[in-house]
Image: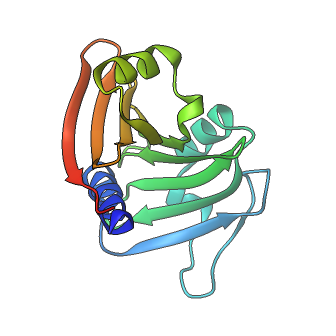
Amino acid sequence: MKKIIFFAAVMAFNYANAQIGSNTNVMNSKTEKNTEYNSPANNESSNEEVGSKVMKHFSNRYPNAINAQWSVHNNKTAVCRFYENDILHRVYYNTNGRWSGTVTTYQHFLLPENIKIMVSAMFPEYVIKLVKEVNKPNHHPVYVLHAQSLKYLKILRATDEEGIEVIQNFESSN
């Protein structure tokens, strides 16, 4: 039951942030370099679909990205999913080829210490299980945290400026 609740919460978060169109074209990069692409047989894509502005930004900002998978959507937005330093990143670009945000998913031990302290002070019986760091242009990072106790799973929103807010609360079945 916990896995179903956790999966539903993650899917809801990804749906709300992605705003993805229904048909996508996917491109996979080779490995460490992001300049060459292999197109899957049934979804032909090209660098032109992603756009040179997007590729330049991506290559400059994420030079160590591994296994980049590009999706270009009907509305011409682009999403790149990749790993850098064993951490999952999803980078979003708008229709003008401008960076619109990044969602980085990682384990609790990489969470900034000040956020850990806020969570433990407010929810001492909870353990942070997963972190999604959301970065948008001209905004401070927002942390979406999956925190679990023996009885509950909470989805929290945390920022340096605004503190912690409970987004969702689920009862665990132990």
Residue visible at 43% across and 46% down in the picture: 92
Q: Specify whether residue 138 is in view.
A: no
Residue 39, image quadrant: bottom right
For the N terminus, the quadrant is bottom left
Residue 3, image quadrant: bottom left
Q: Residue 61: x and y, percent?
A: 63, 32
Q: In this view, does 58 lie to the left or right of 144?
A: right
Viewer-proximal residue, 172 or 169?
A: 172
From this view, report whether residue 21 is shown above or below residue 169: below
Q: Residue 54: x and y, percent?
A: 53, 44
Viewer-proximal residue, 15 or 74?
A: 15
From this view, report whether residue 143 is shown above or below residue 83: above
Residue visible at 43% across and 16% down in the picture: 117
Q: Residue 64: x and y, percent?
A: 75, 40
Number of numbered labels in the structure image = 0
Q: Is residue 152 left or right of residue 87?
A: left
Q: Specify whether residue 87 is in view.
A: yes
Q: In this view, does 83 lie to the left or right of 119?
A: right
Q: Is residue 169 left or right of residue 95?
A: left
Viewer-proximal residue, 162 or 154?
A: 154
Residue visible at 35% across and 56% down in the picture: 10
For the C terminus, the quadrant is bottom left
Outermost bottom residue: 42
Which colour assignment does the render follow? rainbow
Q: Residue 28: x and y, percent?
A: 65, 66
From this view, report whether residue 22 is shown above or below residue 33: below
